[in-house]
């Protein structure tokens, strides 16, 4: 069974930065396409960013382009999201997931990011 664990969330002020991390047990992330999604209270879960196994293809939601950077360290079995210039509208629970079987699968429990104005 794959378990994904997110960390790095917290309470920050607008304009601050955070770095989220995603690691796994039961299955390595090394060969996986990894994605990050977020869900704010009362809203649907939305795509944030993704990265292929070798970093050769990266995607961002328009709302985070230029502010968030996804990266990975396969030696550490970890995927990161550096979030800069945070805005109150970035407040959400952030989840990592892996692409498997043609869909985003194996979600973590999430890490909460709260940005105060």
Image: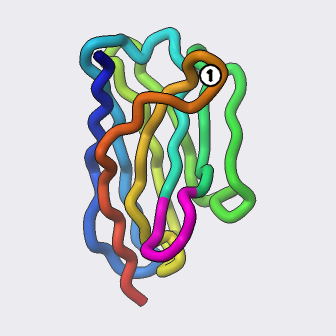
Relative to 23, is 44 on the left or the right?
right
Residue closer to the observer: 53 or 84: 53
Q: How is the image coloured?
A: rainbow
Q: Is residue 29 magenta?
A: no
- Image quarter (top left, top right, bottom left or bottom right) of the C terminus: bottom left
Q: Residue 47: give x, y in percent of width and height.
A: 61, 50
Question: In the displayed structure, would residue 82 be above or below residue 74?
Answer: below
- Count all numbered tags in the image, as a single digit: 1
Residue sitting at x 69%, y 56%: 65
Residue sitting at x 37%, y 84%: 116
Residue sitting at x 68%, y 47%: 60
Q: Please tell me how crowded label 1 is: few (under 14), some (14-19), or many (20+) other residues with Cα within 10 Å.
A: some
Q: Residue 64: give x, y in percent of width and height.
A: 63, 60
Secondary structure type for disc 1: loop
Question: Which residues are drawn in magenta?
Answer: 39-45
- The chief SS type of the magenta part is loop
Question: In the displayed structure, would residue 45 be above or below residue 41?
Answer: above
Q: Residue 61: give x, y in percent of width and height.
A: 69, 54
Residue sitting at x 60%, y 59%: 67
Q: What residue occupies the far bottom of the structure in this picture?
A: 117
Question: In the displayed structure, would residue 26 be above or below residue 113?
Answer: above
Question: In the displayed structure, would residue 74 be above or below residue 38?
Answer: above
Q: Residue 103: give x, y in percent of width and height.
A: 62, 28
- Image quarter (top left, top right, bottom left or bottom right) of the N terminus: top left
The residue beneath circle 1 is 52
């Amino acid at each position: 069974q794959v378990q994904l664990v997110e960390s790095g969330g917290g309470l920050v002020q607008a304009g601050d930065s955070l770095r989220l991390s995603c690691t796994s047990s039961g299955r390595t992330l090394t060969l996986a396409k990894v994605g990050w999604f977020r869900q704010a209270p009362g809203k649907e879960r939305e795509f944030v960013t993704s990265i292929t196994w070798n970093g050769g293809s990266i995607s961002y939601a328009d709302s985070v382009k230029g502010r968030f950077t996804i990266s990975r360290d396969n030696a550490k079995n970890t995927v990161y999201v550096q979030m800069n210039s945070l805005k109150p509208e970035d407040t959400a629970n952030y989840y990592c997931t892996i692409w498997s079987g043609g869909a985003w699968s194996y979600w973590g429990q999430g890490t909460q990011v709260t940005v105060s104005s």
